[in-house]
């Protein structure tokens, strides 16, 4: 799992407002506790409201809203395939599908994702 995807998953887990140990997070994400420690340090350095320490656990100090345009690579791939399918099979909606793909492509550099060819 790439670091960006893992950090996104960590944020999603921590959004429940509960205390999570590094061991618990590591087991859930299939990485070492040392990786979780480094990831938590990165998140804290970027200004995310994460608090905690080794041995006790980690928690988000305040609610965190992620922008709705944050897509996982799998979500992006599914969306791209679906829009391309609509574009080629539904003449009445082809223009709308192309327009939406253009809008999504504009957002992709900000999310660090790139569309995959179907």
Image (spheres, grey):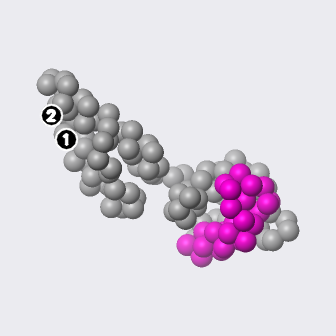
* Left or right of 21, for residue 102: left
* Residue drawn where x is 68% and y is 69% of the image: 35
* Residue drawn where x is 60% and y is 73% of the image: 42
- Residue 85: in magenta span: no
Q: Which residue is mark 2?
A: 95
Residue 75: give x, y in percent of width and height.
Answer: 44, 43
Image vertical order of residue 49 relative to residue 74, above or below: below
Marks 2 and 1, how far apart in space? 6 Å
* Residue drawn where x is 71% and y is 51% of the image: 28
Q: What segment carries the magenta color? A: 21-46
Residues marked 2 and 1 touching at CB (< 8 Å): yes
What secondary structure predominates along the stretch shown in magenta? helix
SS for dot 2: helix
Q: Which residue is mark 1?
A: 99
Q: Quadrant of residue 48?
A: bottom right
Image vertical order of residue 57 relative to residue 86, above or below: below
Nearest to the observer: residue 65 or residue 82? 82
Q: Residue furthest front?
A: 118
Per the rendering, the mark at residue 25 is none
């Amino acid at each position: 799992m790439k670091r960006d995807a893992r950090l996104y998953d960590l944020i999603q887990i921590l959004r429940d407002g509960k205390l999570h140990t590094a061991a618990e997070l590591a087991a859930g994400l299939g990485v070492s506790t040392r990786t979780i420690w480094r990831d938590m340090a990165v998140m804290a350095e970027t200004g995310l409201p994460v608090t905690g320490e080794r041995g006790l656990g980690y928690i988000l100090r305040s609610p965190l809203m992620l922008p709705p345009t944050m897509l996982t690579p799998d979500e992006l791939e599914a969306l791209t395939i679906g829009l391309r399918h609509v574009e080629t099979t539904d003449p009445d909606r082809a223009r709308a599908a192309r327009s939406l793909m253009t809008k999504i492509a504009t957002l992709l550099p900000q999310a660090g994702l790139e569309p995959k060819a179907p």
